[in-house]
Image (spheres, coloured by chain):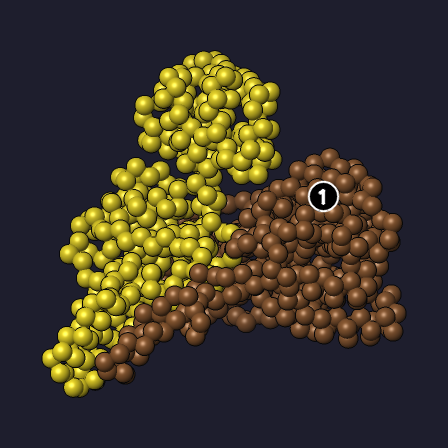
Amino acid sequence: MTEPTETRHAGRSRFAQNILLFARTLRAAGLPIGPGKVIDAVEAVKAAGIGTRDDFYWTLHAVFVARYEQREIFDQAFHIFWKNPQFLQRMMSLLLPQLRYDQPAEDREEIATRLAEALQGERAADAFAEMPADQEEVEIDAVMTFSGREILQEMDFEKMTSAELAETRKAIAALRLPIMEVPTRRFAPASRGRRVDMRATLRASLRNAGSIPLKLKSPKLRHPPLVILCDISGSMSRYSRMALHFVHAITNDRDRVHTFLFGTRLTNITRDLRHRDVDVALDRVAAHVKDWAGGTRIGHCLHEFNSKWSRRVLGQGAVVLLITDGLDREGVEGLEDETQRLQKSCRRLIWLNPLLRYEAYRPQSQGAKAMIRHVDDFRPIHNLESMQALADALGRASMRAERPERNPKRAA
Amino acid sequence: MASLPGNIDEAQALLKAGSYVADRSLATAVFLALKLGRPLFLEGEAGVGKTEIAKVLAETLGRNLVRLQCYEGLDVASAVYEWNYARQMIEIRLAEAAHEESKERLAADIFSERFLIKRPLLQALEPDPRGAPVLLIDELDRTDEPFEAFLLELLSDFQVTIPEIGAVKAAAKPIVVITSNRTREIHDALKRRCFYYWVDYPDAERELAILRTKVPGAGLDLSKEVVAFVQKLRQRDLFKLPGVAETIDWTDALVQLDQVALSTGAIDNSLGALLKYQDDIARIRGSEAAAILEQVRAEMTSAAATKLLQH
C-alpha cells in the first residue's frame, strides 16, 4: 500500500465499520453474533489479510459460523453484502475481480427472504448515516414463494372449545412424565453406594486420625433424552392438538426433549415449544407447520427422520414416542424398514395410537401391521386417563420388555 | 520445532507436508486458529479426516500430540487429574507412625503435586521442550453437557482449577483441535471461543489426490474408478454415506485382492469395507453396483474420448 498513513487509517476504521455492519446483518438474519465476534472478525481479517475474495470469505466464515445450518445464510449474506467490490477496494486499496451474484437456487429462496428482511431492516435502522447511499444499496431478487405441490393449511388453534381448552390445559399441565432413569457413568456420594469414594475417604481419614472411615458412592441416575414424533394429519387432528399440550408440558418439565411433527413432511418444532407459555408456544408451532391436517406419509417422514435427524438426536440412548394412527396415505412401501431402523437406533420405541380406544381395534391397516412388528410398546392416547397411564408406563424401568408381537392387545 | 505458518499459503503447505490434502478454506481456518491462538472446532460426518488434521499438525509442527478421547460420563478424574490415593494413604500412615501432629501440614503435604496423576488436559498445559503440544479433544459430542461446561475455563484462559492446589495455567498455549460428529449440538458458549469449520466430503479431484497420497500402491486407473464410484455412491440415498476413510480402506482392500480395475465381482466381495450398514449393502450389492459401475465406465470413456479429440 502506497498511500499516506492517514487514508490507510481511515480505511481501517471504515473497514471495521463494515464488518460490524455485516455482523449486524447476520444477527438480524438469525445468527447469534455478539460484539465479541465482531472484534474477533476484525482481528482475524487483520491476521489473514485480504488476499482474495475466497480467503476473505473463509476468514469471516471461520469466525461467524458456528453451526452447520448457518452456512447457507452466511453464504448468501456474504455474497449480497460484499457484492459491491468497492467496499473492499476503498478500504484496502486492493482490486478484487468483479463478482457476480449468483441467483439463489429455488430451495434457498426461503432463506433469502429472511435475509432480505434483515437487510431492509438494517437499512431502515441506518446506524451509519455517514455511509454513502450507493454503498448500502442492495438488490435482492427474492420473492416470497410457496410450493404449489402441497395443499398447505395453516393450523387453527381457535377451533378448540374453551371448555375443552381449559380442561386439557389444566390437567395436562399437571401431568408429569416419570420416564425411567438410567444410570450414567458419573457418581454421587451415597451412604449405601457400591464403590468407594476414594477422595472423600481420604479427606475423612485426615479428619479422624487412626481410622479410615469408608465413604461410598453410586452412579447418578438421569432421564434418557426423549424424542417425540407426532402425526398431525387430518385423521389425527383431534388428538394431535391435545398431544401438543402434552408435549409442551413435558418439554418444559425436563431437558433433552426433541419434538417433530409430521404429516406430509417432517418439521422440527423443538425450539418453538421451549416457550413457557403454552399459547405462545403453540402459536409459534402453528406459524411454523405448513402441512396441518393434510395427508400422511409416515414412511417418507420416518425416512427423513432416520437419515437427517436420528444421528443427531437419538444419541445417549433416547426413548422415542411415535404418536400416530398408522393410517398412511402412501401405502406401506419402506415403512417397515424405516420403523425397524428407528427402533434399532433408540433405547425404546413407544407407539401411541389414539385408535386403541376402540376395544375391538386390531392393527389391520397395512401401515399399522408393518409398524407394529417393530415397536417396543403400544399404547392408547385418546384421553387424559390414557395419558396418565402412559406416564405411569414410562416410569417403569422396562427397556424392551413389552414386545407387542407377543401380546398386541395388552396395552388396550 | 517448525515455526507456525505466517499466512494461508504456508498453512496449506504445512498440511500438504503432512500428506493431508486440504481445501484452501480449511487452510484458512487452520491458519487463523494457529495465528490467533484459538481452538479449532472441526465438525463433520464420520470418516472425513477430522482427527487426522490434529495428528498432521502435531507431526509437521514437531509438537507432541495429547489426545483426549471423549465418552459419555467422562469426568474430571479421567480427563484432567486424579489424586494418587494409594500413595496418599501410605503417606498418612507414615506420618502417623512418625507422630506428625499438624493436620494442616499433613493435608498440605499429601495434596501436593507429588501425588497428582496428570490426565490429558493437565498434561497439555505442562511446559514441553518441543513447544506447546497439540491437544486433540476427540468426539466432544459424546460427552455430556457438564463436561462441556468444564471445558470453557480451559479453552478461554488455558488454565484448570484444582481445588487443593489452585489454578494451573498453561506454560504456553497449546494448539487445541476439537472434533465433533454432530450426534448432538455443542453449546454455542463453547463454539464461540473457537474457529469453526465444517469438514465436508471432498470433491472428486481432491479425493483422487488424497487417494494417490494415501494408497500409492493403487494404479491411477483403479484410483480414478474408485473415486468416481464413491462419488456416485454419495449421491444415492444411503443411511451412512462412505467417508474418505472408507474410500481409502476400500482401495486398500482392492489392492490386496490384486485388482487393477473395478469389477462387479470385486465390488460385491469388498463392499463391506465401504458401507457399514447391512441395509445399505443389500441395496447396493449386485445390480445397483453394476449399474453405477457401468455409468462410471461410460463417463470415463467419454472423458478420455474428449481428451483425445482435443489433442
Q: What's the residue at 59%, 44% (across, down)?
A: A344
Palette colour of chain B: yellow
Residue A245 locus on image (x, y percent): 74, 66
The picture quadrant where one finds residue A193 is: bottom left
Above or below residue B277? Residue A305 is below
User: In the figure, is residue A349 to the left or right of B144?
Assistant: right
Residue B86 locus on image (x, y percent): 23, 66
Q: What's the residue at 27%, 83% (across, down)?
A: A208
Q: What's the residue at 25%, 68% (across, down)?
A: B85
Camera-side residue: A346 or B239? Answer: A346
The picture quadrant where one finds residue B108 is: bottom left
Crowd around label 1: few <14 · some 14–19 · many ≥20 (10 Å): few
Residue A274 visible here: no
Q: Chain of mark 1?
A: A
Palette colour of chain A: brown
Residue type beneath disc 1: Glu
Residue A174 locus on image (x, y percent): 72, 74
Camera-side residue: B149 or A369? Answer: A369
Task: Check disc 1 and report its element: helix, strand or loop.
Answer: loop
Residue on which the image places disc 1: A405
